[in-house]
């Protein structure tokens, strides 16, 4: 089914066009991600498709049976109303019924719940109520009677997401779901749940996101807005990067040819007579086309900086027996750690477990309840916080950066001016003279990041640096941090970003417990899932044992427990051979897994090599799980 058709769409703000004469189609089941720099028009395009903003020209056709749902970066609420009133905002009998039921559950009103049971049956509302309960629970939305105006930014974003997901699952058979940065303010477990939810729901999706793992998980096609045009790439993010590089190489070759032709045509133009024949007029028109082509400049979004960092002494930061609580809630319990030169540490954990408090204590902005935190004399912290940019009104971007320093020193002995450094982080000369307050949210985040780096720290603390940053800016940031010689501490829910940059993790597990895990985020998740499977298998063994089977019977499948009257058929010759091969294969896989794990811990591999080893480890674990399941099935048979 044809959902959307767009022809010749153009939109500008002032003299700057966002996109010009773009054409595209969206069909049922399409899952598309949009990539572009901040300020290029991603959010504007979504608003045009939703009907909340009008294009300068072009046609937008949306099928009459299609409902368009837009999840925006800055959601709008009825501020004086409660969370539950904003989520269940549609005046429909089933929606109203579920709202009343959720209120009764939250208030533990047994009488009201009993009265609503029959009505829920009448309207066949139970299936949808289960979905609603899942969404609210997974997004950690519990205080349904709290006023929306009292919510934090992260809570508002989760409530808006819940409202959108409940709306699209309610009664619309054909829905185009458009989402603008849905993973901001979600912890990793919420993001992974959202990935699975969107893949299970039969929804057509148009998505703006900076989270590359999320992008790969939920989309099958990438659209890029660049230089007023729309470029389409089938496949994942890696394929997009490869195809884009080939496109830019081809375009650069075309521009080089145009420049050579331009020089020849320019010489002809200078020599031509004043009288204009039809032939010369045609050549003149072609000259101006060639001139425009030759004048194009492809932006290089790669950055390599050999910075002259402030000297970092032998002593960095020592934390000894650190405790911190807020009331009855323990955030840090007896934490010991010594930071070393050049460390790259990731910090992960659910919201509210103490990550931000830990960062404040590390910078001596907040005292611990007990214990010692010793910071080296040469340490210069650079703090990228979630509070955002602090600036005076009527200050231009270039003035704001120059108020910190005029130049950025390089290790080679030279330096970059404030203007050159701004260009490096994708602020064009025109943009540098824009007032700070007129920048988009993403551009302000980019400027905040730039000013932190421009102050030349040697210990960077980045608290959710990827929120609201576009993918081109993230590529610049990653390249910068990859070569940064100082210490880096990153709090982020962006799994790709963490995998790319960190050496090990501090995992906030709750109740003050902090685990030091030697690996990146993907390796941690593999380890976590392995432990979960071991726990599940142990529970299964315990259940079998409680049912009357001995441990020897379960593990070795060699003898039958008399307490359980189960007659087992004998294995066939073919099954017996399979049984023997499984035992040998499981032993081989265990040895291979141990070898790769040891190899990954040597610290002698590049990021790409570690990614390959991680993929091998995951494949081995999946094969092992399948073999173990088959082995358990066959263990119920009598080997004979």
Image (cartoon, helix red, strand yellow):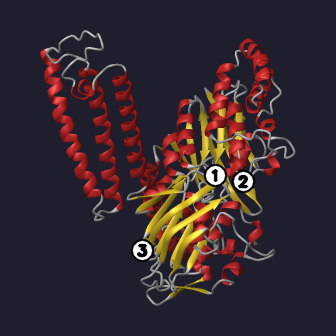
Secondary structure under tag 2 reads helix
Query: In terms of sequence position, does the residue under pointer 1 or pointer 2 come before the other?
Result: 2
At x 23%, y 27%, the residue is: 552
- Identify which residue, 25 or 573, lies in the foreground: 573
Residue 222 appears left or right of 53: left
Query: In terms of sequence position, does the residue under pointer 3 or pointer 1 come before the other?
Result: 1
At x 72%, y 65%, the residue is: 439
Q: Separation of disc 1 and disc 2 at Cα? A: 8 Å
At x 65%, y 75%, the residue is: 429
| Residue 257 visible somewhere in the drawing | no
**Residue 110 image point, x, y percent:** 76, 23
Q: Separation of disc 3 and disc 1 at Cα? A: 29 Å
**Residue 347 image point, x, y percent:** 51, 60
Q: Quadrant of residue 501?
A: bottom left
Which label sits on residue 153? 2
66 is higher (above) or lower (below) than 443: above
Secondary structure under tag 1 reads loop
Query: In terms of sequence position, does the residue under pointer 2 or pointer 3 come before the other?
Result: 2
> Farthest residue toward the right?
80
Q: Does the CB distance between marks 3 and 1 fall below 8 Å?
A: no
Give the class, few, some or many, for how many residues have Cα within 10 Å of label 2's Cα (few <14, many ≥20): few
Q: Which residue is mark 1?
A: 185
Q: Does the CB distance between marks 1 and 2 fall below 8 Å?
A: yes
Q: Which residue is mark 3?
A: 342
306 is higher (above) or lower (below) than 537: below
């Amino acid at each position: 089914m044809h959902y959307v058709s767009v022809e010749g769409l153009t939109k500008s703000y002032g003299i700057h066009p966002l996109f010009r004469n773009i054409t595209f189609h969206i069909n049922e089941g399409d899952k598309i991600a949009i990539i572009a720099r901040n300020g290029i028009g991603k959010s504007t395009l979504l608003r045009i498709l939703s009907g909340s903003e009008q294009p300068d020209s072009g046609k937008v056709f949306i099928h009459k049976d299609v409902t368009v749902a837009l999840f925006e970066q800055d959601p709008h609420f009825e501020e004086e109303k409660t969370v539950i009133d904003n989520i269940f905002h549609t005046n429909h009998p089933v929606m109203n019924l579920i709202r009343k039921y959720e209120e009764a559950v939250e208030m533990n009103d047994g009488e009201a719940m009993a009265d609503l049971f029959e009505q829920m049956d009448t309207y066949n509302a139970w299936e949808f109520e289960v979905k609603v309960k899942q969404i609210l629970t997974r997004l950690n939305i519990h205080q349904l009677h709290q006023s929306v105006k009292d919510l934090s930014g992260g809570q508002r974003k989760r409530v808006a997401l819940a409202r959108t997901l409940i709306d699209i699952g309610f009664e619309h058979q054909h829905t185009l779901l458009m989402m603008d940065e849905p993973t901001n303010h979600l912890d990793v477990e919420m993001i992974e749940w959202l990935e699975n939810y969107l893949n299970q729901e039969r929804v057509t999706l148009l998505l703006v996101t900076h989270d590359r793992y999320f992008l790969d998980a939920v989309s099958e096609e990438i659209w890029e807005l660049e230089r007023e045009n729309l470029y389409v790439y089938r496949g994942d993010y890696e394929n997009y990067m490869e195809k884009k590089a080939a496109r830019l190489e081809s375009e650069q070759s075309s521009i080089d040819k145009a420049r050579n032709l331009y020089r020849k045509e320019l010489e002809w133009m200078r020599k031509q007579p004043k009288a204009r024949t039809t032939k010369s007029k045609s050549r003149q028109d072609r000259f101006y086309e060639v001139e425009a082509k030759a004048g194009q400049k492809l932006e290089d979004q790669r950055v390599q900086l050999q910075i002259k960092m402030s000297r970092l002494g032998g002593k960095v930061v020592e934390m000894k027996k650190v405790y911190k609580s807020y009331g009855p809630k323990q955030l840090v319990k007896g934490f010991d750690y010594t930071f070393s030169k050049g460390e790259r540490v990731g910090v992960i954990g659910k919201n509210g477990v103490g990550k931000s408090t830990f960062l404040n204590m590390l910078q001596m902005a907040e005292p611990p309840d007990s214990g010692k935190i010793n910071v080296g004399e040469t340490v210069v912290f650079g703090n990228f916080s979630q509070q955002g940019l602090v600036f005076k009104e009527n200050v231009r971007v270039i003035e704001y950066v120059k108020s910190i320093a005029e130049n950025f020193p390089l290790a080679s002995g030279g330096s970059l001016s404030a203007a050159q450094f701004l260009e490096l982080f994708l602020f064009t000369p025109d943009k540098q003279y824009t007032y700070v307050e007129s920048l988009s949210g993403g551009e302000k985040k980019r400027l905040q990041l730039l000013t932190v780096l421009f102050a030349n720290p040697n210990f960077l603390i980045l608290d959710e640096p990827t929120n609201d940053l576009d993918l081109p800016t993230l590529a610049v940031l990653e390249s910068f941090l990859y070569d940064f010689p100082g210490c880096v501490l990153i709090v982020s829910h962006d799994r790709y970003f963490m995998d790319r940059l960190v050496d090990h993790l501090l995992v906030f597990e709750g109740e003050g417990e902090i685990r030091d895990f030697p690996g990146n985020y993907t390796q941690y998740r593999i380890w976590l899932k392995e432990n979960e499977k071991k726990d599940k298998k142990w529970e299964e063994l315990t259940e079998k044992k409680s049912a009357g089977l001995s441990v020897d019977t379960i593990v070795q499948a060699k003898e039958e427990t008399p307490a359980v009257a189960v007659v087992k058929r004998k294995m066939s010759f073919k099954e017996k051979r399979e049984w023997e091969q499984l035992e040998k294969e499981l032993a081989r896989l265990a040895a291979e897994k141990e070898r790769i794990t040891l190899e990954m811990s040597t610290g002698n591999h590049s990021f790409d090599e570690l990614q390959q080893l991680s993929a091998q480890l995951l494949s081995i674990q999946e094969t092992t799980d399948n073999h173990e399941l088959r082995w358990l099935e066959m263990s119920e048979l009598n080997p004979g």
